[in-house]
């Protein structure tokens, strides 16, 4: 059987990364979190004090090595999975990922990483730009209050107690930036299946996606 590619897109807090990781584990496939890659670029840019607003300064991407292995992200060989979740990275990542130069580099890397393997890839532009021929495209949504609640609870686990209203505002700002940028905005692919996760548990969403994959595999093998 030829490789199978699943594209999962959606806004902040829709559950993309958690769900994609669990789906990939169930099937013993590879999971690639493209958000983590944009976060790693942002982390490098902050640590090396480049001017984040100047697209020309991102040529460092020709030299640095970013890799994603078993749900861990490595920057120049160092595991930065925790560091990329910092407040500072979260605040700046939408700006960094709005530059066409950055996107082109990341999209090339992401496409290469899927060659010849079964993959669940999650992000904002996977079904529309990175893998337009994916075998299955899913667009995850949830209302903004529920997404903020999830982020709020994640924060608490990290020992951060931020007002829920502030979290709602931050999510709204990031959604707006991600959906309105010119280059590859967050958008549902025409052929994506929408799953509203507001009232579903993680397990229920995983189960739904596994069923969709199985259906598509049967269709694919039948052709
Ligand atoms: O997990 P969370 O929803 O916070 O976001 P993420 O998946 O870690 O992505 C962080 C940011 O990277 C997003 O807000 C987007 O600005 C950007 N991103 C993107 O532009 N394209 C992607 N394929 C993935 C992420």
Image (cartoon, grey):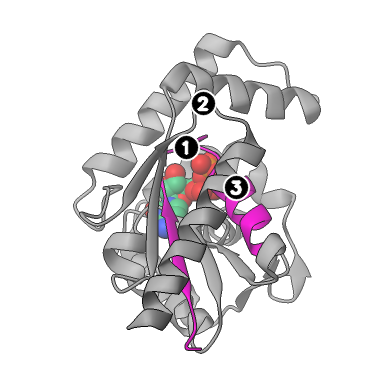
Q: Which mark is residue 147?
A: 2
Q: Mark 1 Cα within 10 Å, few/some/many (few <14, many 20+)?
A: many
- Lower sequence index among marks 3 and 2: 2
Residue 185 within the segment the image draws in magenta: no
Determine the secondary structure under disc 1: loop
- Lower sequence index among marks 1 and 2: 1
- Residue situated in front as seen by the camera: 161 or 195: 195
Q: Is mark 1 within 8 Å of ligand 1?
A: yes
Q: Is mark 2 within 8 Å of ligand 1?
A: no
Disc 1, disc 2: CB below 8 Å?
yes
Report the residue at 37% width, 59% height from top: 137
Query: In this rendering, would 183 be left or right of 53?
Result: left
> Is 185 situated above or below 195?
below
Q: Which mark is residue 218?
A: none
Percent of width and height locating residue 127? 33, 61
Q: CA distance from mark 3 to mark 1?
A: 18 Å
Q: Looking at the image, can residue 46 be seen?
A: yes
- Lower sequence index among marks 3 and 1: 1
Determine the secondary structure under disc 2: helix
């Amino acid at each position: 059987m030829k490789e199978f590619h699943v594209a999962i897109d959606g806004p902040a807090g829709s559950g993309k990364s958690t769900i994609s990781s669990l789906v990939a584990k169930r099937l013993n496939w590879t999971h690639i979190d493209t958000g983590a890659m944009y976060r790693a670029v942002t982390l490098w840019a902050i640590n090396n004090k480049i001017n984040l607003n100047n697209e020309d300064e991102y040529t460092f991407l020709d030299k640095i090595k970013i890799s994603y292995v078993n749900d861990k992200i490595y920057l120049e060989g160092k595991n930065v999975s925790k560091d990329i979740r910092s407040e500072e990275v979260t605040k700046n990542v939408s700006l960094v990922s709005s530059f066409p130069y950055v996107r082109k580099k990341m999209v090339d890397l992401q496409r290469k990483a899927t060659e010849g393997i079964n993959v669940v890839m999650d992000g904002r532009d996977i079904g529309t730009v990175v893998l337009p021929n994916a075998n299955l495209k899913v667009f995850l949504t949830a209302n903004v209050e529920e997404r903020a609640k999830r982020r709020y609870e994640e924060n608490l686990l990290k020992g951060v107690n931020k007002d829920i209203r502030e979290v709602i505002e931050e999510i709204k700002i990031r959604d707006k930036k991600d959906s309105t940028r010119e280059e590859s905005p967050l958008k549902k692919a025409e052929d994506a299946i929408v799953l509203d996760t507001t009232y579903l548990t993680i397990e229920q969403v995983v189960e739904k996606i596994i069923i969709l994959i199985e259906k598509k595999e049967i269709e694919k093998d039948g052709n």
